[in-house]
Amino acid sequence: FVLISGELKSRKNPQMIRQLVLFRKDINFVIHGNGWGKLFDSKLPPNLRISDFHKELQPRLVREASALLSISHNEGGPFPVIEALASGTPVLATNTGFCKELINKENGLVVDVSSDLLTIARSLDKVIGLKPKVFRSDLLPDGHSWQEFAKKLYIQ
């Protein structure tokens, strides 16, 4: 499955996520975050599962996912990208926050914020294809471990 993590907000590009879920019926999606049910009028397609966010579920979902999808218009992080990469899960993200610094061809893809549905769908296929090769790896680049990242964020 492809994991989407976080609360429903307009900056998360919910309409594109909705289009992608409906377009890619061959891929299972899991949304782990609050508020997403209303995006689908409570009629979930068979390839989508939505769960309210529970902190204790996040590590298992991130580890078991074939890919993390983060196609926001604007992000401060996003922290789920770090969680995914540290867990051996490749990421498809838009060029927001620190995504461009962390994601490379070995651990995922970064697409432009203005990417269309077909570009995102094709890119997602490539990212899902990475999981069997990298699932046992910490995919964070050097200098970006949890400890190093926390020091940069909170100590300096």
Image (cartoon, rainbow, N blue to C red):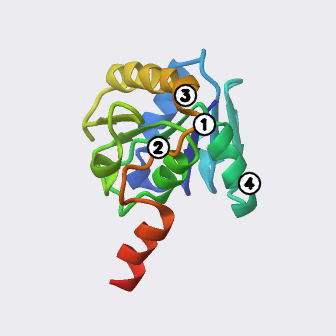
> Which is in the foreground here, disc 4 or disc 2?
2
The residue lying toward the viewer, choosing from 140 and 9, is: 140
Disc 2 vs disc 3: Cβ atoms closer than 8 Å?
Answer: no
The answer to whether residue 36 is above or below residue 21 is below
Label 2, secondary structure: give it: loop
Residue designated by label 2: 139
Q: CA distance from mark 4 to mark 2?
A: 21 Å
- Name the amino acid type tagged 1: Arg
Closer to the chain start, of discs 4 and 2, is 4
Label 4, secondary structure: give it: helix
Residue designated by label 3: 131
The residue lying toward the viewer, choosing from 8 and 110, is: 110
Residue designated by label 4: 57
Label 1, secondary structure: give it: loop
The percent coordinates of residue 154 (x first, y second) are: 41, 81
Residue sitting at 28 percent across and 47 percent down?
A: 100
- Name the amino acid type tagged 2: Leu
Q: CA distance from mark 1 to mark 3?
A: 9 Å
Q: CA distance from mark 1 to mark 2?
A: 9 Å
Disc 4 vs disc 2: Cβ atoms closer than 8 Å?
Answer: no
Closer to the chain start, of discs 1 and 3, is 3
- Name the amino acid type tagged 4: Leu
Q: CA distance from mark 1 to mark 4?
A: 20 Å
The percent coordinates of residue 126 (x first, y second) are: 42, 21
The percent coordinates of residue 114 (x first, y second) are: 25, 37
How crowded is the residue under tag 4: few (<14 C-alpha within 10 Å), some, or many (20+)? few
Label 3, secondary structure: give it: helix
Residue designated by label 1: 136
Closer to the chain start, of discs 2 and 3, is 3
- Name the amino acid type tagged 3: Lys
